[in-house]
């Protein structure tokens, strides 16, 4: 029998494999192109290469994937010859890490920074017990709130002590989930927990929305000393479907139940050990590609894998919780066998059992509660949140500014009603009929939102004149364009005083483009013409809405698309106080974005107490302003909750008034009731008292007359309103959109 490799021998092979994978990844990102780039990436001095290694022409030649594999292959062969026989049967040998010895040294210090003071005008926060305290880390540069440290410690215990393969961090919007996960990552790195568990160049992968990749990297680097190049990779989920994902994934044909099926498969050995999924609602649609990629991660059998899902709004229905639930491998009954780990294969039986008597696809509060109770051992709650300042959420019912606005609203609603009735006369499948209704409903939503332009511009301007900084969340870019034009041309606001967060650009075929293909198909072409829908109506043109304006206006108002760097610059201008207005779409800025009243980007800083509350005397010295946020109605409960969480954050320096603006006496009041049903389901998932839970109910406190007689005609299917935002609403990066099959 061949001898087993020693730890030193294992490390030699592991280091070689990591270097190869890192080089292949750099090649896929085009960070290296030539042999010279490749050799320099290995640590050699570029200035001495020609003298000691290669002739100049060889150095300038393009390097290929095959070249890199051959280069490292020769070293691997040499290494195996050096240690003859020890690697012949070597796969993985997972070595457990010491935990107690690393963690507890008899102290209870949480690393209080020097600028922490005691202040009589701030109520003291809760304290941590020794069992709840994270170990000290020399590389962590920030102080956590006690509830954040408690949650990070629970997640860490779940992974290291209890070997929980999947966990859900559930926390309200603005409670600092990025900081909790940052503290978790820091301790896992300190423990070298992933050593010998994978050959991946990045054993920890942090998946988040494209809009906040840069923001997340900044927090991990500045606050926790994490190397986001070599230690942890922060990506958006689209990158797993693109060239970057080729390092980890392949699209493979396999035989299942005697039939060939094509599915995503993670490459053995190079998959990350730990996958952190931010805003995990992005995998709630189990048929989407991003969900299938996460489901495939749950199929990995070579070596242990761990997942942490986290979001303020993870899911609304039982069917949307598949990725998280399966990741836990919770023991369940499969067929007649008890105690079988939950898998992708057994999920349909599991979800049906938990949801019964409701369907897994139903928005059923009791079913969601049963699911959360069953999964409670794998859920970490953020408890004891005590923000110094709070959000003040209200609903405002407004009247139309002019008779023309009212007429335009009524006409577009009547148009939707006529089109809906026409659709019901066609012989179409359920999905086809739903698509057409959804399309026409989008036209209504766009027009209804545009009617608010003058009102939104007015209240934002008045707020800034009163010494506040004004934010506005909309569903469509066209609305933002109108507000910017109104502020600049009618109120004399400088364009430099306005920040826009709306994204743009794409890497793959978008859902808009897919919808356009459907619209122009033989089946739908005549029907769309019959109901009076055009590509312009649905915002499916190859150009964006604002390009319909005069080129001079587009240039003057700076209404172009944004890349990630430009978007972050716009955010930084607002957060530093250089701009006083910030407008964002729910898709672009409604998730993960921080637009709170802060001192993070100012020279002046507030002192903070031991529970991280700001000393009130210092707040007046900060040049940034109190936030006020205005929101157009969104018909998605998740979008609403996320949108309400952009300005009020844990470290906010003032209360945040937020107003959702509905039109009085219109169909919007009926839609608010539908959203409220989804909020009740979400309440069972989050289980924290939030102002948003009853915010839509406020519309019922008024005597109103709905515009149309048939209230039920808002939707023949409950999901039309929500899905219209997903399919046709403006998005930040089209690369983030889910594939919607029609």
Image (cartoon, grey):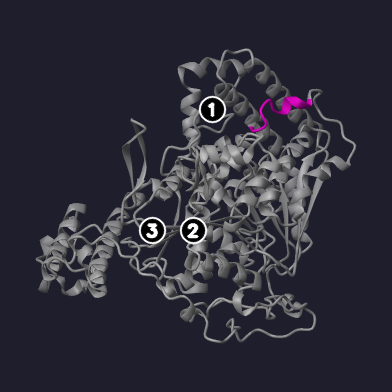
Q: Badge 3: how crowded within 10 Å, few (<14), some, or many (20+)?
A: many
Labelled disc at residue 272:
3
Please provide percent x and percent y for residue 16: 23, 66
Identify the secondary structure beneath mark 3.
loop
Q: Residue at x 16, y 74 (%)?
A: 48
Residue 371 relative to residue 57: left or right: right
Image coordinates for residue 673, horizontal then vertical, percent: 77, 38
Q: Within the image, what quadrant is residue 60 found in?
A: bottom left
Which mark is in front, 1 or 2? Answer: 2
Q: Which mark is residue 189?
A: none
Magenta residues (range): 711-719
Label 1 belongs to which residue?
Answer: 535
Q: Is residue 587 above or below residue 356?
A: below
Tell me which corner region of the image, top left, top right, bottom left or bottom right, holds residue 663. top right
Q: Disc 3 to disc 2, how far (Cα)?
A: 18 Å
Mark 1 to mark 2: distance in Å? 32 Å
Please tell me which of labels 3 and 2 falls first in the chain: 2
Q: Tell me: residue 245, above or below residue 388.
A: above
Please indicate, yes or no, whether residue 485 appears anywhere in the rendered image: no
Q: Is residue 17 visible?
A: yes
Looking at the picture, tell me which residue is in the foreground, 334 or 288.
Answer: 334
Residue 489, magenta (yes or no)? no
Residue picked out by circle 2: 213
**Lower sequence index among marks 1 and 3:** 3
Residues at marks 1 and 3, CA–CA distance in whole angstroms:
42 Å
> Residue at 18% of width from left, 55% of height from top?
62
Judging from the image, what secondary structure is the residue with disc 1 in? loop
């Amino acid at each position: 029998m061949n001898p087993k490799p020693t730890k030193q021998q294992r490390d030699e092979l592991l280091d070689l494999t990591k270097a190869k994978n890192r080089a292949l990844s750099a090649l896929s990102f085009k960070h290296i192109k030539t042999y010279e780039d490749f050799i320099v990436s290995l640590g050699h001095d570029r200035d001495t290469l020609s003298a000691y290694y290669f002739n100049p022409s060889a150095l300038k030649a393009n390097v290929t994937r095959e070249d890199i594999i051959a280069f490292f292959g020769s070293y691997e062969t040499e290494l195996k010859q050096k240690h003859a026989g020890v690697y012949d049967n070597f796969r993985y040998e997972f070595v457990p890490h010491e935990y107690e010895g690393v963690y507890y040294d008899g102290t209870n210090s949480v690393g209080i920074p020097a600028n922490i003071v005691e202040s009589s005008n701030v109520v003291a926060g809760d304290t941590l017990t020794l069992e709840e305290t994270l170990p000290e880390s020399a590389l962590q540069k920030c102080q956590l709130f006690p509830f954040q440290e408690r949650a990070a410690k629970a997640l860490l215990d779940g992974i290291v002590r209890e070997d929980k393969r999947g966990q859900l961090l559930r926390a309200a919007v603005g409670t600092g989930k990025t900081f909790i996960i940052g503290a978790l990552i820091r301790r896992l790195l300190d423990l070298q927990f992933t050593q010998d568990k994978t050959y991946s160049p990045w054993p920890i992968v942090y998946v988040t929305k494209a809009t906040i990749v840069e923001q997340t990297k900044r927090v991990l680097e500045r606050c926790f000393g994490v190397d986001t190049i070599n230690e942890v990779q922060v990506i958006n989920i689209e990158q797993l479907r693109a060239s970057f994902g080729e390092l980890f994934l392949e699209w493979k044909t396999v035989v299942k139940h005697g039939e060939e099926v094509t599915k995503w498969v993670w490459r053995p050995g190079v998959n990350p050990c730990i996958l952190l999924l931010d805003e995990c609602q992005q995998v709630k649609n189990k048929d989407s590609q991003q969900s299938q990629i996460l489901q495939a991660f749950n199929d990995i059998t070579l070596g242990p894998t761990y997942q942490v899902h986290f979001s303020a709004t993870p899911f609304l229905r039982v069917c949307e919780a598949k990725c998280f639930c399966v990741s836990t491998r919770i023991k369940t009954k499969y067929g007649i066998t008890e105690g079988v780990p939950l898998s992708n294969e057994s999920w349909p039986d599991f979800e049906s059992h938990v949801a019964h008597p409701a369907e897994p696809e139903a928005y059923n509060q009791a079913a969601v509660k049963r699911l959360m109770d069953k999964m409670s051992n794998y859920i970490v709650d953020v408890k004891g949140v005590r923000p110094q300042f709070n959000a003040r959420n209200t609903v405002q019912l407004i009247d139309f500014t002019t008779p023309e606005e009212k007429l335009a609203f009524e006409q577009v609603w009547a148009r939707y009603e006529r089109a809906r009735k026409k659709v019901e006369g066609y012989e179409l499948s359920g999905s086809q009929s739903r698509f057409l209704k959804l399309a026409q409903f989008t036209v209504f939503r766009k027009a209804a939102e545009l009617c608010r332009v003058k009102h939104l511009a007015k209240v934002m301007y008045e707020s800034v004149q009163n010494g506040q900084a004004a934010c506005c969340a909309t569903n469509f870019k066209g609305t933002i364009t109108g507000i910017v034009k109104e502020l600049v041309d009618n109120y004399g606001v400088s364009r430099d005083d306005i920040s826009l967060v709306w994204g743009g650009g794409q890497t793959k075929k978008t859902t808009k483009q897919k919808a356009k293909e459907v619209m122009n198909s033989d089946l739908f072409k005549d029907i769309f013409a019959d109901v009076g829908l055009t590509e312009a109506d649905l915002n499916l043109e190859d150009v964006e809405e604002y390009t319909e304006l005069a080129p001079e206006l587009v240039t003057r108002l700076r209404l172009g698309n944004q890349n990630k760097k430009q978007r972050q610059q716009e955010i930084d201008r607002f957060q530093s106080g250089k701009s006083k207005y910030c407008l964002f779409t729910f898709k672009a800025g409604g998730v993960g974005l921080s637009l709170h009243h802060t001192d993070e980007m100012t020279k002046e800083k507030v002192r903070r107490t031991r529970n991280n509350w700001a000393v009130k005397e210092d707040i007046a010295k900060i040049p940034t302003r109190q936030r006020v946020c205005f929101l157009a109605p969104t018909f998605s409960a998740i979008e609403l909750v996320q949108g309400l969480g952009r300005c009020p954050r844990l470290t906010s320096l003032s209360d945040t008034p937020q107003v959702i603006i509905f039109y009085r006496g219109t169909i919007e009041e009926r839609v608010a009731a539908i959203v409220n049903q989804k909020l009740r389901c979400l309440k069972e998932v989050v289980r924290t008292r939030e102002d948003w839970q009853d915010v839509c109910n406020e519309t019922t406190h008024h005597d109103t007359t709905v515009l149309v007689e048939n209230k039920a005609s808002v939707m023949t299917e409950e999901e039309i309103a929500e899905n219209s935002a997903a399919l046709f609403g403006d998005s930040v990066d089209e690369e983030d959109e889910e594939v919607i099959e029609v």
